[in-house]
Image (tube, rainbow, N blue to C red):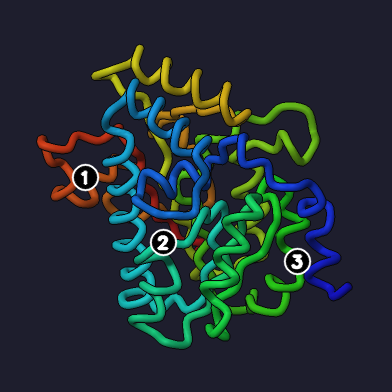
């Protein structure tokens, strides 16, 4: 057994249950991907039945991701990315955007879904500076000590920590176990080893004041089917997580403030908060 197999053994032992929907594969379905099962598609259709804007919201998040990653490489000189809760790699993912600007950019994807990681590894087989590791971002020590992270990321140089469309699946801090580590603790743990000049970027689902009951119904059914809670949060709830970091313009803001072209009345989206913050 090599070091990667050993590091992932605890997570990879269970067989993938195709009847149990996965957030990563539901998201892939909304993006028009093919790495999903019928249970994922059914859960995605049911959630979108309650909130028809969800697929467009997923696509808008991908646009925001591409915008931020391109900016980090082209304008801020970032060459290393740790993408936490990366999901299934799709067209225009982090390594494609970053390496289009800088072919030597390093990307490590982290996800808890074995299907997402298996697909990522097949996709990245011929890419020497992009890797995918099976790990749980709620256990930062395990992620940071994973062989693919240790061997790929140089913590003496700036790194971008990416948390796109994932922290709203993590409730606030509960008992002190890895499975209940809250978003604020996760952020602190991953930013701690980062060199000055590193960045944190987040996209996070927000309360939908235009359709609050539909959002509650969709979140309740989603949690029932996947076993994963959905916790929309406001900018005011997210801002304290960024203590000690320099929040970049336009601040802790709706992604439609970052990218006004996303505010398309023909395809309304669920509110999502976007963040880019620098470690001084």
Query: In terms of sequence position, does the residue under pointer 1 or pointer 2 come before the other?
Result: 2
Give the CA separation, mark 1 to mark 3: 36 Å
Is 133 on the left or on the right of 248, as rendered? right
Q: Horizontal and vertical percent for residue 177? A: 80, 36
Residue 236 visible somewhere in the drawing: yes
**Disc number for residue 228:** none
Q: Which residue is mark 2?
A: 90
Q: Is residue 181 left or right of residue 242?
A: right
Counting residues from the start of the chain, the first of labels 1 and 3 encountered is 3
The residue closer to the viewer here, 94 or 118, is 118
Q: Position of residue 149 (x, y in %)?
A: 68, 70
Q: Are marks 1 and 2 in contact (CB under 8 Å)?
A: no
- How far apart marks 3 and 2 lie (CA) works out to 23 Å
Q: Residue at x 14, y 50 (%)?
A: 261
**Viewer-nearest residue: 7 or 247:** 7
In the rendered image, the vertical position of residue 195 relative to residue 67, given as above or below: below
Label 3: state its secondary structure. loop
Q: Who's the residue at 34% across and 20% down the image?
A: 50
Relative to 17, say whether 94 is above or below.
Answer: below
Q: CA distance from mark 1 to mark 2?
A: 25 Å
User: Residue 33: which quarter of the image?
Assistant: bottom left
Provide the residue designation for mark 3: 146
Q: Which residue shows up at 67% across the image and 41% down it?
A: 17
> Crowdedness of circle 1 by 10 Å Cα count: few (<14), some, many (20+)?
some
Quadrant occupied by the N terminus: bottom right
Q: Secondary structure at mark 1?
A: helix
* Image marks 3 and 2: residues in contact by CB distance under 8 Å: no
Report the residue marked by disc 1: 257
Q: Nearer the viewer, mark 1 or mark 3?
A: 3
Is label 2 in a helix, a strand or a loop?
loop
What residue is at 53 percent from the left and 83 percent from the top?
127
Residue 195 visible here: no
């Amino acid at each position: 057994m090599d070091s990667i197999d050993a590091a992932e053994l605890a997570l990879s032992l269970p067989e993938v249950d195709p009847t149990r929907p996965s957030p990563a594969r539901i998201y892939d379905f909304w993006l028009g991907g093919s790495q999903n099962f019928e249970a994922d598609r059914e859960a995605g259709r049911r959630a979108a039945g309650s909130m028809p804007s969800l697929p467009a919201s997923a696509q808008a998040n991908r646009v925001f991701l591409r915008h931020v990653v391109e900016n980090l490489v082209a304008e801020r000189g970032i060459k290393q990315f740790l993408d936490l809760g990366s999901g299934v790699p799709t067209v225009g993912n982090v390594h494609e955007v970053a390496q289009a600007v800088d072919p030597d950019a390093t990307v490590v994807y982290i996800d808890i879904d074995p299907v997402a990681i298996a697909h990522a590894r097949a996709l990245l087989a011929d890419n020497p500076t992009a890797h995918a590791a099976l790990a749980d971002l709620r256990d930062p020590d395990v992620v940071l000590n994973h062989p693919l992270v240790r061997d790929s990321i140089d913590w003496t140089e700036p790194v971008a920590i990416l948390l796109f469309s994932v922290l709203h699946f993590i409730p606030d801090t509960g008992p002190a176990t890895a499975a209940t580590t809250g978003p604020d603790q996760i952020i602190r743990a991953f930013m701690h080893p980062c060199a000055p000049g590193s960045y944190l970027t987040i996209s996070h689902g927000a309360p939908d004041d235009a359709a609050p009951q539909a959002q509650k119904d969709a979140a309740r059914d989603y949690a029932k089917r996947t076993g994963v809670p959905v916790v929309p949060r406001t900018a005011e709830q997210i801002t304290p997580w960024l203590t000690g970091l320099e929040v970049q313009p336009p601040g802790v803001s709706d992604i439609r403030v970052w990218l006004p072209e996303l505010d398309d009345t023909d395809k309304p989206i669920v509110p999502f908060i976007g963040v880019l913050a620098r470690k001084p």
